[in-house]
Amino acid sequence: MATTTEAAPTRTYPSLRAAWIPMAALCLAFFVEMVDNTLLTIALPTIGRDLGSGTTALQWVTSAYSLTFGGLLLTAGSIADRFGRRRVLLVGLAAFGLISLAVLAVSSTGGLIALRAALGVAAAAMAPITNSLVFRLFDDTALRMRAMTVMIVVGMSGFILGPVLGGTALAHVGWEWLLLVNAPIALAAWVGVRAGVQPDRAADLTDDRLDLPGAVLSIVAIGLGCYMLTSGIEHGWASATTLATAVCAAAALGLFVWHERRTKQPMLDLRLFADGTVRGAVIAQIATSIAMAAVMFGLILHFQYAYGWSPMKAGLANLPLILTMVLGTPLSEYLVKQFGHRVACLIGAVFLGGSMAGLAWGVDHGYLVIAGFMVTLTIGLRTVMTIGAVALIGAMPEKRTSMGAALNDTAQEVGTSLGTAIVGTLIAALVTTSLPAGVWSDDLVASFFHGERIAYAVLAVVVGVIALWGASTLTDSREADEHP
């Protein structure tokens, strides 16, 4: 397949305001793929009644999306670096919108699961490319940091607000509209990308052939790895299903590493991990996602079950996360400017671990205390996530920026699965494997708080150690270019 690209110099922008068209389009693309992660969660009971679905089938309605999405990120990044980032994003947006319209033809749970899996494929073609393209819009380091901040805030807002938006919509329309709304959003993003983002130049793309065996092995390894964590919660860590999946995932990962080391044109050059910046940024991003997923999962249970709040109220209770993402920008930028990537990321890691420890103490001290630690946690998230993304993409070869963004997203997907698995397993072991609906007894609430305290204390150590480890290998650079 030939790659046709423009030969003109890549256009960059002097400010975020000047780049409002491509920024708005890329933010829309990122928002729709992130909100789709959680939007249907609130609608699962309604879907179950309408389609006659069982509990396991409903779980696959959400899992099908995350498994195809996580498994295909590296492959999508490799394809984008070969055939054009803008081109692949436009294809992904078009597919996402059209597949969402197909919900009108869904009449069974199996059909919905297949549709969600297809949406995950399309989203994987969007996620790493939106980040690599927004990075390409600017030459200035500070502008790149701010642009990444906007993307992270938009993406996390979509992830957090999914249940709130879904619960509000369900009061007025059928659950199918939660997917149909993707189509006009994807169309608007497609138009904005087409108008505001320049086609890739041939000089900015790699001419390496696609590493199809590596792509297949990466999909199998990541997909099975994420499923193993889901299976551990659902079937037990010692179950035959979980153990078999773990063995197969490890075998696929081993084959992937073996293949990538011996092939002349690997999909992912493993020698990149010898660079402390690449290695440290990936490790730090895993830590941020463990913390984010664990807190989101734990607090959803906390607010809706222990407090008995409605899904909408519970969603609104997470607003400190979003507000701090926005308002914490000056602090994060100051830390980077003053100390460089490594020290700023170390400070962020301390915020992460300290906030998890604070939540372990504060779970039974009321919402205001919890909200306070949500603020400090988000300062850590905001700092580490942005520095990690900027440093990782900046450290990649110029022709592999989409692969850098894909590595960033894959690390976050792995961290999300780990965080959810850790909290889910500890709550199941310390409290109960079946959380009853309705008003909880005082004894059950007390038991749940006890389980939360232990879970967050364990996570404080896990997140703190991983984040500090990753941050310690970054450089003191204040620039986006991390090449030694």
Image: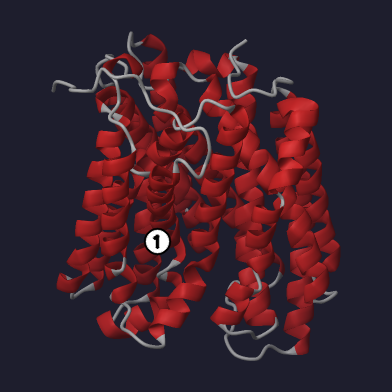
Scheme by which the image is coloured: secondary structure
Q: Does residue 113 sit above or below 4 in this rendering?
A: below
**Could you tell me which residue is drawn at 43 percent across and 75 percent down?**
166
On the image, the x and y values in percent for residue 63 come to 40, 58
Q: Is residue 414 left or right of residue 473?
A: left
Residue lying at 51% horizontally and 51% vertically, measured from the top left:
229
Q: Nearer the viewer, residue 265 or 1?
A: 1
The quarter of the rendered structure image containing the C terminus is: top right
Instruction: Give the x, y percent position of residue 58.
Output: 37, 71
| Residue 236 visible to an observer of this rendering | no
In this image, 381 relative to 248: left or right?
A: right
Would residue 114 be found to the left or right of residue 394 on screen?
Answer: left
Q: Examine the rendering and report whether any part of residue 431 can be seen.
A: yes
| Residue drawn where x is 66% and y is 73% of the image | 317
Q: Nearer the viewer, residue 71 or 142?
A: 142
Horizontal placement of 128 versus 211: left or right? right
Please state the total of marks drawn on the protein image: 1
Q: Position of residue 466 (x, y in %)?
A: 71, 37
- Quadrant in the picture for the N terminus: top left
User: For the residue labelled by badge 1, is the local secondary structure a helix, a strand or a loop?
Assistant: helix
Depth order, front residue of 335/231: 335
Mark 1, residue position:
36
Q: In the picture shown, does residue 278 fall above or below 156? A: above
Query: At which x and y percent is residue 442?
Result: 77, 88
Among the 4 quarters of the image, the one containing residue 267: top left
Camera-side residue: 262 or 9? 9
Q: What is the three-letter code of the residue carrying label 1?
A: Asp
Rendered residue at 66%/77% (across/down): 303
